[in-house]
Amino acid sequence: MSTRAKLRVGTLLSEVLPESVKWLWRGRIPLGKITMLDGDPGLGKSAITLDLAARVSASNPMPDGTEGASGGVVLISGEDGLADTVRPRLGAAGADCSRILDLTYSNGEFFQIAEHLPELKQAIHQVSAVLLVLDPVMAFLPPKKSSNSDQEMRQALTPLAKLAEKTGTAVILVRHLNKAETLSNALYRGGGSIAFIGLARSGLTVAESKRHAPFRVLAMSKCNLAKLGPSLLYQIRENGEKISVEWSGQSEETATDLLVAAGPQAIRKRAEEFLLKELSTGPMSSKTLTERGKAEGFSGKTLQRARHDIGIRPHQTAHGWVCQRPEQEVRRTDGQVDTDEIPCGHA
């Protein structure tokens, strides 16, 4: 009887040493993983990646003030010129450009993920890169692969994910949005296959703010490694030919708020929440309440319907027409509502 030794297969989890997640930007961009950055053209996706590259190269804090990773950066940019766009923007952001390497062309050939992984690995080691940016990722996919095929995109991107894990480099893939605004989840708004966001451990989204014009918003659509962090407001500042990102605090808007076109019911629900919040501290003049609602983007008709649905009934007082939450109404012993003694509150 044969006594051939049995070969081991697989990995026993008892032999795996647990490790904590390491972050380029805590809670948003993990080291050794893929992060997607999605958004429409013209909103500053490239400016944001260069802002992050500058912070990493110069050992500066992240946009929310937290400490970030420090090290080299590899940039692969298919849309912006190095001399007239990338270099000036990095300079405006205070980058240490001696730690930033561009690999858009590898030995004279336009970079392709499948063909140039050895050169990419060399570039990462050359500058001790902790950040790699491919902007936009669609420009560097194998030409015969369909970006809408889950199987083909996983085959194309998995080696990149493995390289990120092996080197500990955070990878940001920049992508444009599709036109499907009626979808119910921001995760499906990125262009191409769902495999992109499926492989990514974190997803970031940029969009115009609907509540804080003229600001734009950087929101999180996904994070497998931590709870979703708060959205951040920003603006793009221009100083001659130099463009930079100015960060301006937090926003309550989520990625879904920003990317999914809300139907009438969802809009009315938000209007109801707005009305109840505004009236939580007491009565308010109808005129003031309507003005504030319109400033938040609600039409007069939407506010009127939402007011009716939750039982807010304007009453005329000596101070003019006043609105209040239903539970705040003062009732007389005959059951009638009496508001003559109610002040205008915020009016």
Image (cartoon, rainbow, N blue to C red):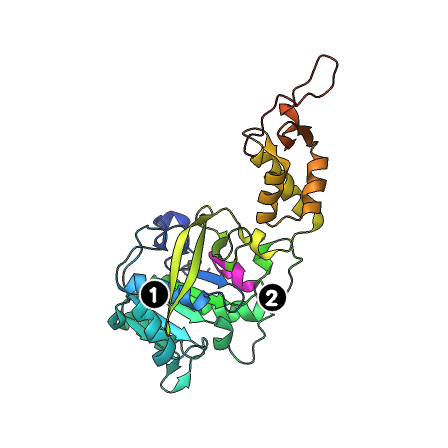
At label 2, the amino acid type is Asn
User: Which residue sits at x=69%, y=29%?
Assistant: 315
Residue located at (67% from left, 58% from top): 182
Residue 106, how many percent across, how many down? 37, 82
- Does residue 271 appear anywhere in the picture? yes
User: Which residue does the image show at 30% across and 57% down from the upper left?
Assistant: 69
Q: Is residue 130 visible?
A: no
Q: Which mark is residue 178?
A: 2
Specify start and end residues of the magenta stretch as a single range.
195-205
The answer to if 197 sits in the magenta stretch is yes
**Is the residue 120 above or below the residue 230 in the image?**
below
Apparent side of residue 205 relative to residue 182 in the rendered image (left or right): left
Task: Say whether residue 8 is left or right of residue 324.
Answer: left
Mark 2 and mark 1: Cα distance apart in space: 26 Å
Task: Please name whichever residue, 256 or 122, is drawn nearer the observer in this view of the structure.
Answer: 256
Check disc 1 and report the residue beneath it.
53
Assess disc 1: are there few (<14), some (14-19) or many (≥20) residues with their C-alpha within 10 Å of its C-alpha: many
Please tell me which residue lies in front, 48 or 107. Answer: 48
Query: Is residue 129 rendered to the left or right of residue 156?
Result: left
Q: Which element is circle 1 on?
A: helix
Please report whichever mark, 2 or 1, sits nearer to the chain's N-terminal start. 1
Residue sitting nearer the eye, 321 or 255: 321
Tell me what residue is drawn at x 42 percent, y 53 percent: 28
Q: Residues within 10 Å of mark 2 (few under 14, many from 20)?
A: some
* Magenta stretch contains residue 79: no
Disc 2 on helix, strand or loop? loop
What amino acid type is highlighted by mark number 1?
Answer: Ala
Q: Residue 249 location, x and y as percent? A: 41, 50
Q: Is residue 316 above or below residue 264?
A: above
Q: Position of residue 199 (x, y in %)?
A: 50, 61
Viewer-nearest residue: 158 or 217? 217
**Residue 76 — which label?**
none
